[in-house]
Amino acid sequence: MLKASTTNIKDNILHIQQCIVGAAERVGRDPCEVTLVAVSKTVSPALIQEAFDAGMRAFGENKVQEAQNKIQALANAPLIPSPTWHLVGHLQTNKAKIAAELFNMIQSVDSVKLAETLSQHAQKNLPILLQVNISEEPSKSGFSTKEISSAIGHIGNLPKLQIRGLMTIAPPTDNFEECRPFFKKLRLLRDSLGLEHLSMGMTNDFEIAIEEGATLLRIGRAIFGERKEPYHAY
């Protein structure tokens, strides 16, 4: 078994879960509708196991190679029941084959070309989310709100891919209430498309995201603390 660190991950997770319950109840939602995805980028397998032992069952990774190393290391533990792995970072098409094999869900499908490549390589049904640039920032990847309907029409016909919902990243701000209009806009878009999931909300803004309908939260710092240095598998 991997050696756990002294980081107070269990208490962090408990606190977040309490916040999830509070935010959901404020707007009359069932907290069970919300899944917490622990974003474990740069985090060692030992800390992931500690989070697993504290009750986490879904983990998010940003980079394919880093995730592959960790998943292989944790397979020797092993973690029972098996956790689900979400790719939440940008995916290059040349890494699509490995990603399709590794992950239970790819949240960051941001182009038709990427979807086509994933479909070609997927050996089983692969749940995906379509990333939407809801704030229309030039620096961000994702479909525009004008593109999303036609993208779904095309991607929805590709073999093996299951479009489960939408994902977005709110614009950076010190006033997190400013994220609310973007979360609401994504929820209304999701509803108009008849999809299930909304992946939105991170460490600073996840309670607002819950109030606006998030079903998947991507939280890293509030669980594992500030990233001090990248994780290396060697």
Image (cartoon, grey):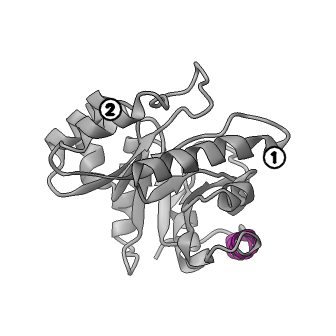
147 is higher (above) or lower (below) than 14: above
Who is closer to the viewer here, 68 or 207?
207
Q: Nearer the viewer, residue 148 or 174?
A: 148
What amino acid is labelled 1 in the image?
A: Glu
Q: Please state which of the two labelled residues, at mark 2 or mark 1, is closer to the viewer.
A: 2
Q: Which quadrant of the figure has residue 172?
A: top right
Q: Which mark is residue 188?
A: none
Nearest the viewer among 82 and 207 is: 207
Q: Which residues are magenta?
A: 8-24
Q: Amino acid at mark 2?
A: Ser
Residue 208 drawn at (x, y percent): 73, 55
For the point 41% across and 55% down, the residue is 195
**Residue under the image location 40 percent in, 65 percent down:** 84
Q: Residues within 10 Å of mark 2 (few under 14, many from 20)?
A: few
List the residue tagged with mark 1: 177
Residue depicted at x 57% and y 68%: 34
Is 19 covered by the magenta stretch?
Answer: yes
Query: Looking at the image, how many numbered discs can be counted on the residues?
Result: 2
Which is the main secondary structure of the residues drawn in magenta? helix
Is the residue 145 above or below the residue 221 in the image? above
Q: Is residue 25 left or right of residue 162?
A: right
Q: Secondary structure at mark 2?
A: helix
Task: Give coordinates of residue 202: x percent, y percent.
Answer: 66, 51
- Position of 182 with respect to 37 (left or right) is right
| Cα distance in 3D space between marks 2 and 1 | 31 Å
Where residue 158 appears, x then y in whole percent?
18, 42
In the rendered structure, does residue 53 fall within the stretch colored magenta?
no
- Label of residue 150 in the image: 2
